[in-house]
Image (cartoon, helix red, strand yellow):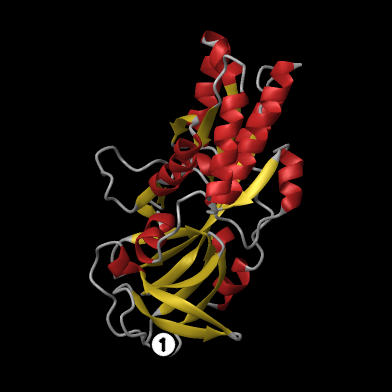
């Protein structure tokens, strides 16, 4: 276990090379699951938990970690499996997602594996909108399921998806002043269904059309198709909002590929990711992204989108 914990603290250098490391764990004695090490702060044996009255059934209690109180979620119960029951002997994976720190209760921690994002594949077709899978991979002939943690947290903790009235008023005024014949259009790349819908809802509130892609590879394929076959769509594209972690091609690699293509090199790229705790801003500059925003603050995202909408309108008016 000590080697696993030590490895968790060393794994930021893979960003930008379409590689990641996965901490594998089990919720029972069978199926293996995985989480990107980049999102993990540490792994500990489950400490004593204080049960909170009237809390969500998935929240097993709260733990005091270095002077901070964090919720501990029963990950098995959260994804529809039998609860882990007695917490003694189990482990807690401390993570940071979407600007919050929380622990996930698991039965046992396996090990860390180094992989290429191309080996991380979308869930099989037919898994449905109620699935908690965001991706799958294979390790030593065994299927490893990557859980859509953003979906879990959305269901347990929730998030405000409404834009403030001030930003909505600014968006309406901008639309009234727009004299161009090119309505704003945004391409969104994110493997989490919850995250895609949150971004789309933000854009819908702003009155901005969007096209959704489920990973970086599909986004790049679409952009290359537009460049080859429908250049007017490319000209009308205001910006790209991309997650960093995605099956087959991550957001860093997508940005690097865009910058290397003469037809796509000037696309405005906003990286929008739940990697808020360990994100290296130098990596944004290295791959050539224009901006980074940690998920999910609708006002921050909306303000960034409107800034780029106005900038493009001004260029068209010159």
The residue positioned 43% from the left and 90% from the top of the image is 48
Q: State the image coordinates of residue 199 (x, y, percent, origin top left).
A: 48, 43
Element type at mark 1? loop
Question: Crowdedness of circle 1 by 10 Å Cα count: few (<14), some, many (20+)?
Answer: some
Q: Is residue 211 left or right of residue 231?
A: left
- Whether residue 243 appears in this view of the structure is no
Q: State the image coordinates of residue 53 (x, y, percent, origin top left).
A: 32, 85
- Whether residue 145 appears in this view of the structure is yes
In which quarter of the view is residue 237 placed? top right
Q: State the image coordinates of residue 225 (x, y, percent, origin top left).
A: 51, 16
In the image, 195 versus 142, the foreground residue is 195
Count the marks: 1
Q: Is residue 89 above or below residue 92?
A: below
Q: Is residue 145 above or below residue 58?
A: above
In which quarter of the view is residue 46 placed? bottom left
Q: Is residue 103 above or below residue 263?
A: below
Q: State the image coordinates of residue 162 (x, y, percent, origin top left).
A: 46, 50
In which quarter of the view is residue 258 placed? top right
The residue positioned 76% from the left and 16% from the top of the image is 318
Q: Is residue 44 above or below residue 223?
A: below
Q: Is residue 238 left or right of residue 125?
A: right
Q: Say which residue label 1 marks.
A: 49
């Amino acid at each position: 276990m000590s080697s696993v914990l030590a490895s968790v603290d060393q794994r930021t250098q893979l960003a930008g090379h379409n590689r990641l490391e996965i901490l594998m764990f089990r919720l029972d004695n069978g199926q293996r699951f995985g989480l990107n090490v980049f999102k993990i702060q540490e792994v500990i044996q489950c400490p004593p938990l204080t049960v909170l009255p009237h809390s969500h059934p998935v929240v097993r209690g709260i733990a005091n970690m270095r002077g901070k109180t964090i919720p501990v979620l029963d990950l098995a119960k959260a994804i529809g499996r039998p609860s882990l029951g007695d917490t003694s002997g189990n482990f807690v994976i401390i993570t940071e997602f979407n600007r919050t720190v929380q622990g996930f209760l698991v039965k046992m921690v396996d090990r860390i594996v180094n992989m290429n994002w191309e080996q991380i594949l979308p869930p099989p077709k037919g898994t449905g909108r109620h699935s908690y899978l965001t991706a799958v991979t294979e390790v030593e002939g065994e299927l490893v399921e990557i859980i859509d943690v953003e979906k879990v947290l959305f269901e347990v903790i929730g998030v405000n998806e409404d834009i403030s009235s001030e930003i909505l008023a600014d968006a309406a005024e901008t639309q009234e002043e727009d004299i161009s014949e090119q309505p704003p259009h945004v391409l969104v790349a994110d493997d989490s269904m919850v995250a895609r819908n949150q971004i789309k809802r933000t854009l819908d509130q702003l009155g901005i059309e969007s096209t959704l892609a489920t990973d970086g590879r599909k986004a790049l394929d679409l952009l290359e198709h537009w460049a080859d076959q429908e250049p007017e769509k490319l000209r009308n594209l205001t910006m790209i909002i991309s997650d960093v972690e995605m099956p087959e091609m991550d957001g860093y690699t997508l940005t690097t590929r865009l910058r290397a293509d003469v037809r796509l090199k000037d696309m405005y790229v906003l990286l929008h990711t739940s990697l808020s705790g360990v994100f290296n801003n130098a990596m944004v500059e290295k791959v050539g992204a224009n901006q980074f925003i940690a998920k999910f603050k609708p006002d921050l995202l909306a303000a960034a989108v409107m800034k780029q909408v106005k900038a493009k309108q001004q260029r068209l008016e010159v």
